[in-house]
Image (tube, helix red, strand yellow):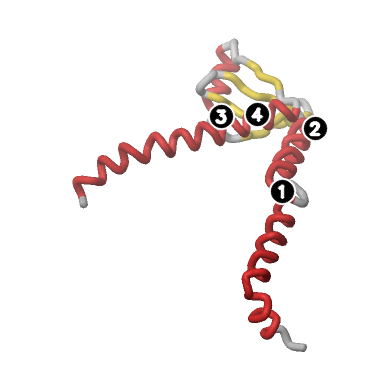
Amino acid sequence: MKRFLPLLAFILLPLALSACASHLDKKEGYLREAGFRTVKPSTPDQIAHFQSLRKGHITHETRNGQTMFMLADERTNTLLVGSETEFQNYQEILYAKSVEPGKKTAKFTKGLENVWNQGWGSVLGSLVPQ
């Protein structure tokens, strides 16, 4: 079994990395859709600040009384930058993508209907007190 562990790691590592990349791609796409703009750090101070940010995570900073949200992408050496309004748009997009109103409810209802129609209705119905 121990000799298969390196092989298993060799197979699973690329899968894990691709899952992270696709998650980051989705996040970046949603941020762009929300109105975030791409900024390429160019001055030494900007580059140093970029390098200090946690990669792949949205961070926020307040400067001159204005809160800015940033996502550092080390693959492209760029920042996605947005204001509170764009971040609010991003959160609404995430909510809309994760909930998909009506879709999950319809799927659950259809599944329940299938269980009921397969003969479980009489069994489940007998469990409900009259």
Mark 2 surroundings within 10 Å by alpha-carbon count, few (fewer than 14), some (14 through 19), many (20 or more): some
Mark 1 surroundings within 10 Å by alpha-carbon count, few (fewer than 14), some (14 through 19), many (20 or more): few
Give the percent coordinates (x, y) of residue 71. Answer: 62, 29
Give the percent coordinates (x, y) of residue 89. Answer: 77, 35
Q: Which mark is residue 121?
A: none
Indicate which disc, 2 or 1, sits on the residue closer to the N terminus. 2
Indicate which disc, 4 or 3, sits on the residue closer to the N terminus. 4
Residue 46 vertical position relative to residue 1 in the rendered view, above or below: above
Label 2 element class:
helix
Indicate which disc, 4 or 2, sits on the residue closer to the N terminus. 4
Identify residue type, mark 2: Thr
Distance from the alpha carbon under mark 1 to that under mark 4: 18 Å
**2 vs 1, front mark:** 1
Label 3 element class:
loop
Distance from the alpha carbon under mark 2 to that under mark 1: 21 Å
Choose between 39 and 107: the one closer to the eye: 107
Identify residue type, mark 3: Leu
Q: Are marks 1 and 4 in contact (CB under 8 Å)?
A: no
Quarter in which the C terminus is drawn:
bottom right
Residue 63: quarter of image: top right
Residue to which mark 3 is pinned = 53
Identify residue type, mark 4: Gly
Choose between 93 and 124: the one closer to the eye: 124
**4 vs 3, front mark:** 4
Mark 4 surroundings within 10 Å by alpha-carbon count, few (fewer than 14), some (14 through 19), many (20 or more): few
Tell me, yes or no, if residue 106 can be seen here: yes
Q: Which mark is residue 85?
A: 2
